[in-house]
Amino acid sequence: MNNSLKQPANIVVWVVLLTMPYWMGFVGGYTELATRILVMALGAMALNFLLGFTGVLSFGHAAFFGLGAYGAAMTIKYIAPSSMLALFIGVLVGAIAGALIGALIVKRRGVYFAMTTIAFGQVFYFIAFRWNTVTGGDDGLNGWHREPINLGFTQLDIYHNPMLFYYFVLVIFAVSVGIMALLLNSPFGRTLLAIRENERRARFLGIEIERHIWMSFMVSCVFMALAGGLYALLNNFTDPRALRFDLSGNFVIMAVMGGMRSFWGPLVGAAIFVALQDVVSSHTENWMSVIGVVFVLVVLFFPRGILGLTRKANNS
Amino acid sequence: MSGNSKLNIRRRNLLQGGLVLGASQIASPFIMTARAEDTIKIGWDNPLTGTYAAPGKNELIGAKLALEEINAKGGIAGRKVEIIVEDSTSGDAGTAVQKARKLIDKDKVNFLIGNVNSALAIAMAQVSNEKGILHIVPGGHSDTMTGATCHWNVFRVCNTTQMEANAIAPTLIKTYGKKWYYITPDYAFGHALQSGMEKACTALGGTKIGGDLTPLGTTDFSSYLIKAQSANPDVIIFLVQGDDMVNALKQAVQFGLDKKVHLAGAQQELENLKGLPPEARVGNWVMEWYFDQPNVPHVADFNAKVVKASGYVPTSRTWFGYVGIWTCALAAAGAKSIDAAKMAKALQDFHLPPEIALCPDGAFYRAGQNQLISNLYVGKARVKGVKGPDDLFEVTSVVKGADVAGTLEESGCKMTWPA
Amino acid sequence: MQLILFDVFNGLITGAFYALMALGLSLILNLSGVINFAHGGFLALGAYLSYTIMPYTGFFGALLVAPVLTAMFGLVIERFLIRPLYGRDPLYSLLLTFGLAYIFEDGSRYIWGAQSVPYQVPAYLSSPLSTEFFFLTGYRVFMVVLVALAVGALFYVLTYTRLGMRIRAGTRDLETVSTLGVNVRILRNLNFGLGIYMAGLAGALAAGLLGLQPTIGTSLLMPSFVAIIVGGLGSLPGTLLGGLLIGVASGLTTVILPSASEAIMYVMMGLVLLIRPRGLMGEEGRVH
Amino acid sequence: MSLLQVQNVSRHFGKLVAVNGVSLTVEPGELRAIIGPNGAGKTTFFNLISGFFPPTSGKILFNGQDVTALSPEQRVNRGMARTFQITEIFPELSVADNLRIAVESAAGLRLRPWLGAKDRGLVRARIDELLDLSSLTPKANRMVGELSHGDQRAAEIMMSLALNPKILLLDEPAAGMGDQETYDISRLIRRVHKQQKLTIVLIEHDMRVVFNLADRIMVLGEGAMLAEGPPEDIANSEIVQAAYLGKAA
């Protein structure tokens, strides 16, 4: 791939992310919007590990996002007031669910895979929605909040300082994205690309397709759950909508809008989508139509996404 | 039905707002300081879409009316007032919370209003309390909001579920019988409402002979209705709300239950009755406010203004929104300040003036609980309007809020004030 | 005993709805490879159209006309929005219909308002047939009969008409069908319309039982997906069976444990995937 | 011992019998061609050998072991590699990356999250060797999807070779090619066959290629074996001619 282009792009991305809270105000944003963008971007990139780099469409990934969120929220509410433990448990829950469901559905392909993921995603939605005593049902899980992080020598008060929380999320984002990049540039990552590009050829190179899709699904679920955990910490709250299929669709459109074949595409898509939703829903009660039209326009006119456009221009 | 006009209260000016905020951030990026602005801002974080869109919009109509009146009388503390409207969605508390934070952090609102959905209201209250903003809940009924999880800064206009239960129970026992069967939505609100009804029922010598917890969003109630019918109760109590209530009543009437058993419930809304086919407008209910009060001063005036603005008569929701916004202005006037703590103090046992209370016995925020105590209207749904097509409820008795509100101790609210 | 009998009957009604929705979805999925997320939106549209024209045409007229109007709208949507996506990654049609679902919900709210509208069925239908079996209301029986007729008609069309045979052949092997001189574009268009007709009909019927508001279709969409997976992808009889099965299963669960009435569908789906991955009546080799 | 023994395999698709009791034995180092008219069941036969789908009946032994029930990837790991009638490559990746994936897979590295310097060097060397063998070195960094048909074919063969197979199954390697390309690909196959002593089974329509390359030829017709023998025998066989010309015999 275009290695020459990668380095400057990386620098731009990190500079933008590192300074975002400082200029967010100029463009009409606010710190928590910046944090939200980061969290959603992590989710979209996690999804894209599967969608863009393995070629497998999951349309029920919000389930794992939500499981991460509930795992984190319930840890703080019922077990121990620790943000780090909360994230860990959230990821663990998402990973276990991912492993089980992944094993059930890896044999399916294309639309059928997508459809099964949608249906399975709803299982968790209904559990969260109906199991009032534990999950708080439709009312969501409140009465808890993210806890300051004790580093031994000092304490990071991510609860009261939104700016500090942003950088806390950014560090986790950087580590996660770094791991995903490492995986994608490894033989394992190339194997996934092979599956995306041509499953038949990959199979006849001796690659166990199902096993690799399952593993990619797991990686994706782990980071999705992490994003969900961070989302719960961001809101100091979680509710069943965090696992519903609409959110799954939003993650997919973020990845596609930004460009699902490029590493940073989902980040760009998430930034645009989250900001757009924020602005539009403040201006009109018909924001759903606007979002719907964005879906339609992206599909019809920018199927390769925004970064897909620039890449095309570079190639020619 | 033009959706856009409703948000014309304040169109965000992206560029301008952004520049001002940006400038303040250069100075001290880590500290969000409140800026002196020439307008007083009220943040409106309430449903415009989803299940509760109809009540949410009606609350907004009342709010707009109050806003006009307040500005016509010189605003709050001599400053013009504006409402910044955000759609909280009907069920997505994550969005509601995010919008609340946005209104407080970015728009620097002086007041926060919302929400129809008590779950969202409670989630928002956590934010407003953390930030120390005066927060009015116009229409979320969950008891805990002015009970176990009460906050010094959170005031509620609509009634608690217990008040509604206490208001209707005597009528039902006396007129229809003592054996009750419940159809209750299976979530916190429903559980609270049912236990309220049971308490009120037992106190009057009635008994519960059965009940079902129906999942929220149930579309087919027939199984429950059949069970209820075979338990042979005197009254079937419908505690489901919104769309669930519409579904349940529609199906109950199709089964002919209304001809065999008495149908009733606690909270009813004009919005629901309008959505039912005429034959399904049955049963005894409580309304929290009703427009047909010919003997109460100022009501006719209020009705006329709302009809002029929206084309429909006001519902209790319209009144909630109206009272909610007026509460902001009255609190500031009472405290002679826009400091949240001072305003909250000023609202303790504060009586609304009659032109805003719009009910025969007046309305006041009970101290130590921040709950508005007004009148409740017990009566029957009717198939066809008498005074206009929307007059679908016949008030049989008006109950004094103070009589059904229980004691402050019973509410379970232990208010802690900021140091 | 009467109660169980009732719950089976009731489950069949629910299942009939799921099946009606799912058959439409399945038709479109099988021939065009499109998961129509907007199907719930089309259902709502059918219901609202029926509500709107009822004052002019009466109940039965509306029941006849509204689904046709919905289907015509579907034809237009297919022609201009979905057709350009054939042959591309199924991801895109999924996203497109997902976006359409948003627009439909918002559009319904804009036109007809957020609160339920009173949808009235004739009085003689909306009362019990007998005092003993009071749960057999005229409307419920009427609905079951109508759904049965519609499903019967669908299978008749698919089995005995030229269009139907082409649709079935196209589902198996679209390439061959096109080389035989069948215009695949028109075939897919008509097939889409047929699927949407089922959604419109389901909507016009459902509004007599449920509150008619903009999200009326959403609650029926997910069970339809489950019905398709349980019944077996690619098999219309399977879809029908799947719909009825999960309907009855959730009806019976309502008696025992109401809060699990939805969970049971997903449990069934999980079991089917585990034991018989291609679904109850799915064709072999369709797993992939 | 024979490398590949196909014993009396059949494959039914519903009522259609695509392959009917065909047997085949291939010795190490042999280059075997399978010919037959369209619809003779050649590709189905290939699919059975490579494990694309299982036979309805019959047995396949590879290297003396029964592989009938093994999946394609298991067969690949035992030393079977194949190409397809319609070239199967990774079109949006470069030639080098196509080969890299194959090389890493063959080396058992495909689950590694990272590679040491030594492994990286070995992979690099093997890729260069394959590029060199196929004369694709100048095009190593181009996307395969952009290359000519002949080059794509060559790349596919090289990917199969990267697996270090004991047997290579080529499904119509010269299909859809012009004269020059056909010549080039024949030369490549011959080179691979001679230099690496690789056992090859190929299906081909182009008789120039078949008679130029094959040690022995098997003829299929309507799912059954019609004849088998050295090229010159087959060229003169009446059965074969009849099969190709129609149902005259």
Image (tube, coloured by chain):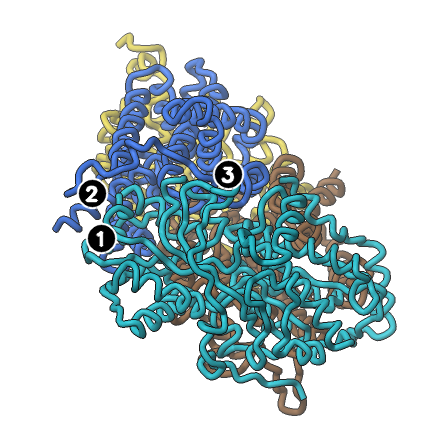
Chain colours: A brown, B cyan, C blue, D yellow
Q: Which is nearer the eye, B102 or A83?
A: B102
Q: Does C70 sit left or right of A169 as displayed?
A: left
Position above or below: B254 against D236: below
Q: Which is nearer the eye, B182 or B382?
A: B382
Q: CA distance from mark 3 to mark 2?
A: 47 Å
SS class, disc 2: loop
- Label 3 or label 1, whichever lies nearer to me, is 1
Cβ atoms under marks 1 and 2 closer than 8 Å:
yes
Q: Is residue D204 visible?
A: no
Q: Does A202 sit left or right of C160 as displayed?
A: right
Q: Please identify the quadrant where the C terminus of chain A is shown.
A: top right
Amino acid on which the number 3 mark rests in the picture = Pro
Q: CA distance from mark 1 to mark 2?
A: 10 Å
The residue that appears at 40% across and 71% down in the rendered structure is A134
Whether callout 3 and callout 2 share a subunit is answered: yes
Residue B212's disc is none
Residue bearing mark 2: C134
The residue that appears at 36% across and 23% down in the rendered structure is C169
Amino acid on which the number 1 mark rests in the picture = Gln
Amino acid on which the number 2 mark rests in the picture = Phe
Residue bearing mark 1: B229
The residue that appears at 57% across and 77% down in the rendered structure is B366
Q: Residue furthest left?
A: C1
Mark closer to the chain start, 3 or 2: 3
SS class, disc 1: helix
Q: Residue furthest bottom?
A: A153
